[in-house]
Image (cartoon, grey):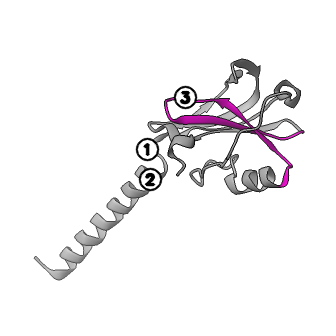
Amino acid sequence: MSGRAVVAGLLGFAAVFAVALWWFQTRAHYREVSGLAAISVAGRMLPVAEYRGLDGNSPLKLRGCMRLDPAALDGLPPAPDAAPLGTPAWFDCFDPEAIAADLAAGRARAVLAAADQPQDFDIILAYYPDGRAYLWRQLNAKFRD
């Protein structure tokens, strides 16, 4: 076997492996969700519009972007330690750094949408006065240490 054939084979294998690795890291474990008409927040069903979300085989993969009536969330206590998690680059409606900065600056507010859903994970909803809202799941206090 010539050296060129070996090199070409190795380069071909590396290219196929790189594409497979990229796909498994950014696409394989996510599925896009759209068209939800309502979400459950603290036991209340709230109508939403323009829902675009991600879900996957891990509880931490839940993300959602939507519009809702912020007045419907009045009176709910703030979520402690709300920390939006990252998303794949192709899911561009959810910017965790901007959401975290807005929460810290008081431009957005976060509420606990559901506790222990599933066990040891909380669902957090961050929303803005203009109706934009973002949903994610994070580890609850039991695992934060």
Q: Amino acid at mark 2?
A: Gln
CA distance separating discs 3 and 1: 23 Å
Q: How crowded is the residue under tag 3: few (<14 C-alpha within 10 Å), some, or many (20+)? A: some
Provide the secondary structure element on which disc 3 rests. Answer: loop
Q: Is residue 45 above or below residue 19?
A: above
Residue at image position (50%, 35%) is 120
The N terminus sits in image quarter: bottom left
Provide the secondary structure element on which disc 2 rests. Answer: helix
Left/right of residue 1 with respect to residue 129 in the rendered view:
left
Left/right of residue 68 with respect to residue 129 in the rendered view:
left
Q: Position of residue 58 (x, y in %)?
A: 46, 39
Q: How crowded is the residue under tag 1: few (<14 C-alpha within 10 Å), some, or many (20+)? A: few
131 falls in the magenta region: no
Disc 3 target residue: 117
Residue contact between numbered discs 3 and 2, judged by CB atoms under 8 Å: no
Q: Which mark is residue 25?
A: 2
Q: Position of residue 106 (x, y in %)?
A: 85, 50
Disc 1 target residue: 28
Range drawn in magenta? 105-129
Q: Position of residue 45 (x, y in %)?
A: 72, 18
Residue at image position (86%, 28%) is 74
CA distance separating discs 1 and 2: 7 Å
Left/right of residue 133 with respect to residue 119 in the rendered view:
right
Q: Quadrant of residue 4?
A: bottom left
Q: How crowded is the residue under tag 2: few (<14 C-alpha within 10 Å), some, or many (20+)? A: few
Provide the secondary structure element on which disc 1 rests. Answer: loop
Residue contact between numbered discs 1 and 2, judged by CB atoms under 8 Å: yes
